[in-house]
Amino acid sequence: MRSLAVLLKLNGHEVKGSDISPSDLDFFEKYNIKVFDGHMPSEVKKADVVVVSSAIGEDDVDLQTAKRFKRKVITRGELLGEISSYYEKVIAVAGSHGKTTTTALIYNILKKEKPTLHLGGILKEENTSFIYGNKKYFITEACEYHDNFLYLKPYVGVITNIEREHLDYFKTFENELASFDKFRNNCKNAIDGQGEYHIQNIKHRYGKLCFDIYLKDECVMSLKMNICEDVNAVNALLAYRTCKLLGVSDFEIKRGLESFKGVKRRFEKVKSKVFKSVIVDYAHHPTEIKNTLQTAKKIYKNVVFIFQPHTYSRTKELLKEFVEVFKDEENLIFYKSFPAREKKEAGLSSKELAKILGRKYFDDADELVSYLQTEYPINTPIFIGAGDLPKLLEDKKYIEKL
């Protein structure tokens, strides 16, 4: 939402926003965008267009005000689709996992072309989720939640993978697959799976992910990347295939992939005054978590995992998968659920998941840190999840700024 707000501002519109827990206000002040803490019905009355994210419920005060005063209301997905239509070539990355990293990799390869980037994470090197470029390329994540990605008409559409996700909206996996089929049909060129390409010789050397890209039996590129997790080899392959389709040379693709510094909170090593080493990772789906656990054990001798579930509905719908991925982890702690848009009644809480697995649970960050210092003094804490725990740890000075 914030990147779209800036895009509108830079194109001459007056933009204001509201949030029940606003953050990164310095970012908005830089662009002279006023963000209200809480609701702002008096401002909504004056608006020409009101844009709402999928996290906003029908009972929201500002949304109700907009409808009562007959203001035009559109979704974030609709706005993204409209903005993207002004660009020559839209590159949209969809999928259950790996969207952010794959999108960022494509941007890094095409950086010399000065593309516009709309990202769901923060680029480490640029320290932003938004790059305002020229009108040739618009590179964006394509979120399937509420079918938002169906408003896009990509020149290249990438599907990283499809798994059971967002079932609070889709209800069934079949419905989710049908939506991805519609997205694929909206794309002039669609890239999914590895195609005729495959990855070989994955190794970890001095903090770098090393691997080869093969076309059938021929090695077409050997890479040494600055990001850890094995799954990023597949993300890099998707970025490689996308940019080959766009006519980018192998030299530029290799340069872009190997110079990539990563995205914040994607297996990110963070400095800390209370721990020798800390990793923060955004994984919140069982498959993503499994990759994080495996990577951590390859790199660190002693680890302890702290998981904060993201939404009650996901925890309930994927309970079997969560139990399967965590059942053999002894050094595992749960922190209270991040509800996002939901209420407890929507599903299963972190406390209930911890009880099912027979693991320790905390709902206070200070108590959690104290316990880690006492019980796991030599272990590397791996904080997993898409919730607010890393920001809490940052605010309390347990870890340095992400």
Image (cartoon, helix red, strand yellow):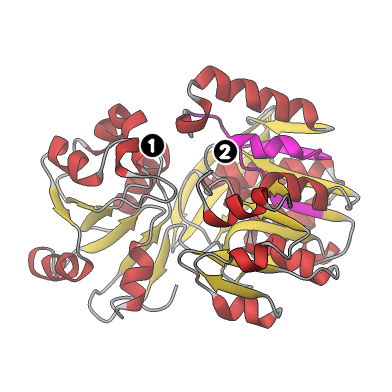
Q: Quadrant of residue 395?
A: bottom left
x and y percent of residue 128 in the render?
62, 70
Residue 314 is labelled as 1
x and y percent of residue 291 in the render?
40, 43
Q: Secondary structure at mark 2?
A: helix
Q: Secondary structure at mark 1?
A: helix
The residue closer to the viewer here, 200 or 281, is: 281
Note whether 154 is above or below 274 in the view shown.
above
How far apart, in angstroms, are the residues tagged by discs 2 and 1? 13 Å
Look at the image and say whether residue 150 sits in the magenta stretch: yes
Asked whether the viewer can see residue 189, the reply is yes
* Residue lying at 36% horizontally and 75% vertically, measured from the top left: 394
Q: Magenta stretch: give its range.
A: 138-163
Q: Residues within 10 Å of mark 2 (few under 14, many from 20)?
A: some
Q: Quadrant of residue 78?
A: top right
Residue farthest front in this picture: 68
Residue 145 is labelled as 2
Point out the image quarter for the C terminus: bottom left
Q: Left or right of 107: which side holds 273?
A: left
Q: Quadrant of residue 217?
A: top right
Residue farthest top in this picture: 174
Point out the image quarter for the N terminus: bottom right
* Residue lying at 25% horizontally and 62% vertically, measured from the top left: 381
Q: Left or right of 146: which side holds 282?
A: left
Query: Do the residues bearing badges 2 and 1 touch, measured as CB atoms within 8 Å?
Result: no
x and y percent of residue 16 in the render?
67, 69
Q: Residues within 10 Å of mark 1 (few under 14, many from 20)?
A: many
* Residue lying at 64% horizontally and 73% vertically, measured from the top left: 126
Note whether 367 is above or below 32 in the view shown.
above
Give, as a three-letter code, the residue at label 1: Arg
Note whether 13 is above or below 71 in the view shown.
below
